[in-house]
């Protein structure tokens, strides 16, 4: 009671595009005001509550605000354990009382009774919860296992797959047998996958920990998805791109002779452990590449995330991506496509430059094109990323753009800051926008 479930719940629902169900409101709609129901006895109310919760849990994926007493039922606790990710919104007794005093809540009429109830429920809350949170951002991060600081040591045997260069700069996140990979993109190959399939000694109860940038987490995640038909894994991203984007969302994969990321699997990590401290050694070029994804995320979210202090910036970007991913975990609905803002142009420029343009440079330019086509101000991109036109072959880039996997002429644009749309753009306009990104 008074923890802010309705407010936080509604925000989480909005971020994840899931229906929001406030259990107390639902009970009232069906059976009348809760104070009146309580007059007939708490036991009867609890039974109604148990039944309706079971019904809600059997329905579509939703964000549910539970009444404060709902988890007192062992049957409800068991149903939550099987079906839900349950978050305990932590609040002090003082703050909760301030919010509920003077309301018509039957169990919040006397301060002393309220405080006794608060104390008596703390333990069952702690036991029922999969995570403890205060804000909607906390909930989104927790739901995808994203945490700052230390890894929760996995139960069972662990092996570490790490970018060899990163291992020279930073201590491994835990003690375990190490498989060092070639640095960066080179690791996303069939040869590396086959080597790991052979070298790993883990059984099905084992956990693979990936320590490196997006390249390392992509390949290690793919190995985790396929080794013994799939084992648990933990991502410890060491690049800004990895912490705000690549390590979040369960997409894993490698490159094939035909192109980037053409073989892969959705396989969500158990944890994504973010330590902004490791970014201290990141070369400027890699930091800029990460900032391009930060600006992308800020434009999608409609917030100047790039202006936040580093830790908050990473947190906010990771939480935004988590929300979009949770709205469409396996990219079936199309909302995950939003995350490709600027990327259709970026991939075209990468290909059209014979991959001399880096992904970060290309994304910065791609965002510029997307904003121009959207009729939106381009200054965030120009001020933060300062993109310069690249040397590339326009026909080659155009051909690559036409092959884009989203389908011909389909782009992510912005109706307004924070309002992405998937829409078509006439060829002539798209080609002109592309040409403007290429040095003449
Ligand atoms: N799965 C996804 O959803 C997703 C999303 C975005 C990008 N990606 C993939 O991520 C890859 C790019 O990953 P990336 O940009 O994180 O870089 P990366 O893993 O390719 O590494 C880039 C370079 O940075 C070095 N490096 C890594 N951490 C460092 C540190 N802390 N200090 C110093 N050097 C360090 C590496 O050794 C390497 O040389 C691409 O293959 C891309 O396809 C995947
Ligand atoms: Zn990108």
Image (spheres, rainbow, N blue to C red):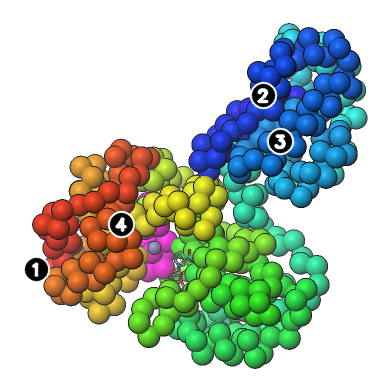
Label 4 sits on residue: 342
The x, y position of residue 52, in whole percent, is: 73, 30
Between the C-alphas of marks 3 and 2, the distance is 11 Å
| Relative side of 382 to 292, left or right | left
Q: Residue sitting at 54 percent across and 87 percent down?
A: 192
Between the C-alphas of marks 4 and 2, the distance is 42 Å
Picture quadrant where residue 232 is located = bottom right
* Highlighted magenta segment, given as a residue range: 285-295
Q: Residue sitting at 63 percent across and 64 percent down?
A: 269
From the image, state whether disc 3 or disc 4 is nearer to you: 3
Q: Secondary structure at mark 2?
A: helix
Label 2 sits on residue: 26
Q: Residue sitting at 53 percent across and 43 percent down?
A: 16
**Which disc, if any, is residue 440?**
1
Q: Earlier in the sequence, mark 3 or mark 4?
A: 3
Between the C-alphas of marks 1 and 4, the distance is 21 Å
The x, y position of residue 432, in whole percent, is: 12, 58
Label 3 sits on residue: 55
Q: Secondary structure at mark 4?
A: loop
**Residue 289 part of the magenta-drawn span:** yes
From the image, state whether disc 2 or disc 1 is nearer to you: 2
Quarter of the image where the N terminus is located: top right
Q: Is residue 438 visible?
A: yes
Tag 3 near tag 2, CB within 8 Å: no
Between the C-alphas of marks 2 and 1, the distance is 62 Å
């Amino acid at each position: 009671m008074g923890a802010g479930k309705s407010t936080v719940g509604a925000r989480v629902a909005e971020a994840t595009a899931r229906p929001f169900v406030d259990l107390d409101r639902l009970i009232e709609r069906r059976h009348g005001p809760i104070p009146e129901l309580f007059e007939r006895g708490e036991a009867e109310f609890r039974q109604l509550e148990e039944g309706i919760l079971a019904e809600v849990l059997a329905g579509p994926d939703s964000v549910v605000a539970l009444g404060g007493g709902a988890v007192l039922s062992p049957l409800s606790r068991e149903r939550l354990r099987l079906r839900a990710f349950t978050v305990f919104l932590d609040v002090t007794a003082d703050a909760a009382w301030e919010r509920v005093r003077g309301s018509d809540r039957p169990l919040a009429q006397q301060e002393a009774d309220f405080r006794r109830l608060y104390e008596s429920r703390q333990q069952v809350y702690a036991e029922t919860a999969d995570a403890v949170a205060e804000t909607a951002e906390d909930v989104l991060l927790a739901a995808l296992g994203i945490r700052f600081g230390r890894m929760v040591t996995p139960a069972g045997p662990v092996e570490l797959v790490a970018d060899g260069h990163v291992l020279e700069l930073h201590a491994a996140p835990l003690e375990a047998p190490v498989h060092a990979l070639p640095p960066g993109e080179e690791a996303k190959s069939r040869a590396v996958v086959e080597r790991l399939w052979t070298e790993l000694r883990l059984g099905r109860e084992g956990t693979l920990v990936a320590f490196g940038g997006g390249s390392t987490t992509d390949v290690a995640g793919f190995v985790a998805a396929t080794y013994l038909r799939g084992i648990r894994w933990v991502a410890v991203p060491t690049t800004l791109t990895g912490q705000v984007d690549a390590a979040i969302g369960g997409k894993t994969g490698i490159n094939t002779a035909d192109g980037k990321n053409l073989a892969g699997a959705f396989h969500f990590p158990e944890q994504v452990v973010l330590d902004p401290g490791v970014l201290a050694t990141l070369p400027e070029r890699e930091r800029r590449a990460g900032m391009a994804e930060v600006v992308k995320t800020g434009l999608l979210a409609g917030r100047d995330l790039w202006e936040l202090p580093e830790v908050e910036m990473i947190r906010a970007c990771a939480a935004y991506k988590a929300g979009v991913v949770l709205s469409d975990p396996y990219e079936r609905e199309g909302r995950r496509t939003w995350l490709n803002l600027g990327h259709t142009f970026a991939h075209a420029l990468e290909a059209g430059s014979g991959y001399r343009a880096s992904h970060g440079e290309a994304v910065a330019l791609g965002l510029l094109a997307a904003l121009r086509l959207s009729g939106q101000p381009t200054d965030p991109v120009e001020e933060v990323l300062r993109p310069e036109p690249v040397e590339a072959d326009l026909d080659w880039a155009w051909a690559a753009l036409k092959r884009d996997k989203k389908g011909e002429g389909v782009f992510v644009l912005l109706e307004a800051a924070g309002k992405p749309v998937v829409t078509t753009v006439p060829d002539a306009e798209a080609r002109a926008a592309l040409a403007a990104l290429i040095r003449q």
